[in-house]
């Protein structure tokens, strides 16, 4: 039962354009969401997060949007740069119900930013 | 940023043998470490939560006698896959969190690809 889904295994975007990575979840107890970025042969690194009390969080070129009613979040990267090429994982946790330790991950989306 | 070192990065072993994977936090103390497993084209699945000085907490469906976890110090946790079988072949990855921090400060190792022949 995949509680966090990233339906696009890959995405290709031109440099300078916007990259939009999508993530859907099914567990209504999730109240905290994170995006991690992973380069080959390295572990995932934290990118940006959002609490369920917000609908948007921005950090430089990265913005995460949360639509609780649709159980959907997205990561926007603008402008996209070649160095953004990586696998992006969406993750969720249920902090309020004591599940803050446990992250449930999506399957990842491979982003390729082309020159 | 903080570094988590995971070793080995790749291991091939014969069926029936045991394999130990180490996870070290290099520049911070990690009271909690996590072990994940990833099958091809699947998501990272949490196997167990390792707390320094106490028994690990295993997720449902994970055999604690097969996947032995030891967190003997604030900087080291080990996962031993005992009597490995081909179905144990997978990508194993650890993560560590500094004391008192949240998932924004969760640092991952680079993973171990285990192949059981």
Image (tube, coloured by chain):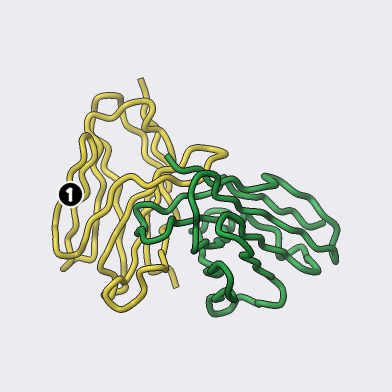
Chain colours: A yellow, B green
Tell me the residue at 23%/42% (across/down): A76
Image position of A44 (left or right of B83): left
Q: Which structural element holds mark 1?
A: strand
Q: Is residue A40 above or below residue B20?
A: above
Q: Is residue B38 above or below residue B27?
A: below
Tell me the residue at 67%/50% (across/down): B113
Total marks in image: 1
Image position of B113 (left or right of B16): left
In percent of width and height, residue B106 lies at 42, 54
In percent of width and height, residue A78 lies at 22, 33
In percent of width and height, residue A98 lies at 34, 77
In percent of width and height, residue B22 lies at 66, 54
Q: Which residue is mark 1?
A: A57
Question: Looking at the image, which residue sits at the far top?
Answer: A115
Residue density around tag 1, few if under 14, some if 14–19, many if 20 or more, within 10 Å: some
Image position of B21 (left or right of A63): right
């Amino acid at each position: 039962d995949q509680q966090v889904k990233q339906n696009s295994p890959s995405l290709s975007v031109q440099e300078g354009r916007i990259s939009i990575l999508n993530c859907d979840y099914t567990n209504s107890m999730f109240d905290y969401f994170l995006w991690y970025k992973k380069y080959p042969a390295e572990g995932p690194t934290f990118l940006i997060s959002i609490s369920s009390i917000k609908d948007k969080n921005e950090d430089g070129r990265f913005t995460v949007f949360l639509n609780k009613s649709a159980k959907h979040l997205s990561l926007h990267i603008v402008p996209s740069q070649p160095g953004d090429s990586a696998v992006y994982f969406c993750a969720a946790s249920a902090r309020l119900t004591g599940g803050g330790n446990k992250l449930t991950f999506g399957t990842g989306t491979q982003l390729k930013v082309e020159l | 940023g903080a570094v988590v070192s995971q070793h080995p990065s790749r291991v091939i072993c014969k069926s029936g043998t045991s394999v130990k994977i180490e996870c070290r936090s290099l520049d911070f103390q990690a009271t909690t470490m996590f072990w994940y497993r990833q099958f091809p084209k699947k998501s990272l699945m949490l196997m167990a939560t390792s707390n320094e000085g106490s028994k690990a907490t295993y997720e449902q469906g994970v055999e604690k006698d097969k996947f032995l976890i030891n967190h003997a110090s604030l900087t080291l946790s080990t996962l031993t896959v005992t009597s490995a079988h081909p179905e144990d072949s997978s990508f194993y990855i650890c993560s560590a969190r500094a004391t008192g921090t949240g998932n924004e400060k969760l640092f991952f190792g680079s993973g171990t690809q285990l192949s059981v022949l």
